[in-house]
Image: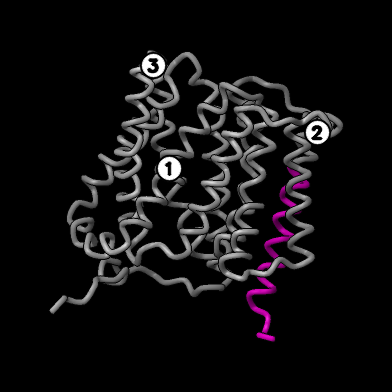
């Protein structure tokens, strides 16, 4: 007779519990998601700094290798104990790791070599759209008028910062190879975000450890391809610094924060925060890359934050509304 499957509670250590839907849980989710988007905005800057210092597949492979080694060592006993649950959902975990971690990152860094920063910024705004539509199709999560208006406002903000305040340039927007790769990457990450809702019933750090291990293993063929084609660039001293930042913040801390944010407010509402990535990316570029700060950055920030507040308020009202 099979023994009972361990659940998340089997491994969870005692900790103060915040009631779902409480003001405290919302505040925690907002802080975690904003932190996540700051890290991912920093990743965009790091990606630009990495050109000529380290090649895309080396970044993708080594970033997850570093995270996997650290997490495997830190959670070894708990990871082994959780294996029966993970094995039961191995197909879902494999697809999530490949889509949300290894392939998304590979496409992101390759796309930067084939398209402009304007196009990449605009296309990143497609992530919350994919998530909201996916939540509607998969989970019957309805889109209200206020939520739709919030989404539109955030997308306008993204378009403002992506076009440097000249929205007329959108008329000349065309998909090229890099645009197509970035759009595919955004779609895959939206799928990963939606799948987080029904991930295996283990603690976030254990789940993340397994995802990082799989992402590292599945990125090895990508690195091998880069080596065979002669396009590999091993890290320079500056490249190692960039890699350490990417591994620690966008790859490790931000992923844990994002998973927790999805747990607290759901994928549809959490995915909307992705529109902050190009905003934070622009601000960090001002500080790190010494790029100019213009009025359109402020206008875009106001639009994006206002859109998130409107859509999030609508989501909270719908979540607490009586059925029928």
Q: In this view, does 197 lie above or below 60?
A: below
Q: Distance between the residues labelled 2 and 1?
A: 30 Å
Q: Does the magenta stretch include residue 29?
A: no
Q: Residue drawn 54% across and 59% down?
A: 29
Q: Which label was assigned to residue 229? A: 3
- From the image, tell me which residue sits under label 2: 170
Q: What stretch is highlighted in magenta?
A: 301-324
Residue 267 in which image quadrant: bottom right
Residue 40 in picture, x, y percent from top left: 53, 39
Residue 6 in picture, x, y percent from top left: 24, 71
Q: Which label was assigned to residue 101? A: 1
Residue 308 in picture, x, y percent from top left: 70, 55
Q: What quarter of the picture does the N terminus occupy? A: bottom left
Q: In this view, does 66 lie above or below 196?
A: above
Q: Residue drawn 51% across and 65% down?
A: 264
Q: Is mark 3 on a helix, strand or loop?
A: loop
Label located before the other in sequence (1 or 3):
1
Q: Residue drawn 47% across and 59% down?
A: 195
Between label 2 and label 3, give the one nearer the viewer: 3
Question: Looking at this rendering, what residue extends furthest in the right direction?
Answer: 168
Residue 157 in picture, x, y percent from top left: 76, 43
Mark 3 neighbour class, 10 Å CA radius: few under 14, some 14 to 19, many 20 or more? few
Q: Does the magenta stretch include residue 312?
A: yes
Q: What quarter of the picture does the C terminus occupy? A: bottom right
């Amino acid at each position: 007779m099979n023994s009972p499957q361990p659940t998340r509670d089997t491994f969870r250590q005692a900790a103060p519990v915040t009631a779902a839907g409480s003001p405290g849980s919302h505040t925690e989710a907002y802080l975690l998601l904003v932190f996540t988007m700051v890290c991912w905005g920093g990743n965009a800057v790091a990606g630009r700094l990495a050109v000529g210092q380290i090649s895309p597949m080396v970044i993708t492979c080594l970033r997850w290798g570093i995270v996997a080694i650290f997490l495997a060592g830190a959670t070894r006993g708990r990871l082994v104990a959780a294996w029966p649950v993970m094995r039961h959902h191995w197909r879902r975990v494999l697809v999530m790791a490949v889509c949300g971690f290894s392939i998304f990152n590979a496409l992101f860094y390759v796309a930067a070599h084939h398209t402009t920063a304007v196009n990449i910024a605009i296309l990143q705004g497609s992530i919350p759209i994919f998530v909201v539509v996916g939540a509607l199709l998969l989970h019957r999560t309805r889109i209200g008028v206020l939520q739709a208006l919030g989404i539109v406002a955030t997308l306008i903000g993204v378009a403002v910062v992506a076009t440097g305040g000249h929205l007329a340039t959108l008329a000349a927007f065309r998909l090229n190879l890099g645009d197509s790769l970035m759009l595919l990457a955004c779609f895959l990450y939206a799928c990963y975000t939606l799948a987080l809702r029904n991930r295996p019933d283990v603690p976030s750090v254990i789940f993340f450890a397994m995802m990082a291990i799989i992402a590292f293993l599945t990125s090895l063929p990508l690195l091998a391809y880069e080596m065979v084609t002669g396009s590999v660039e091993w890290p320079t001293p500056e490249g190692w610094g960039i890699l350490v930042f990417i591994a620690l913040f966008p790859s490790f801390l931000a992923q844990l924060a994002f998973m927790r944010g999805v747990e607290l407010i759901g994928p549809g509402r959490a995915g909307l925060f992705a529109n902050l990535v190009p905003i934070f990316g622009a601000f960090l570029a001002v500080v790190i890359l010494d790029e100019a700060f213009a009025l359109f950055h402020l206008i875009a920030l106001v639009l994006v934050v206002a859109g998130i507040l409107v859509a999030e308020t609508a989501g909270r009202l719908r979540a607490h509304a009586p059925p029928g």
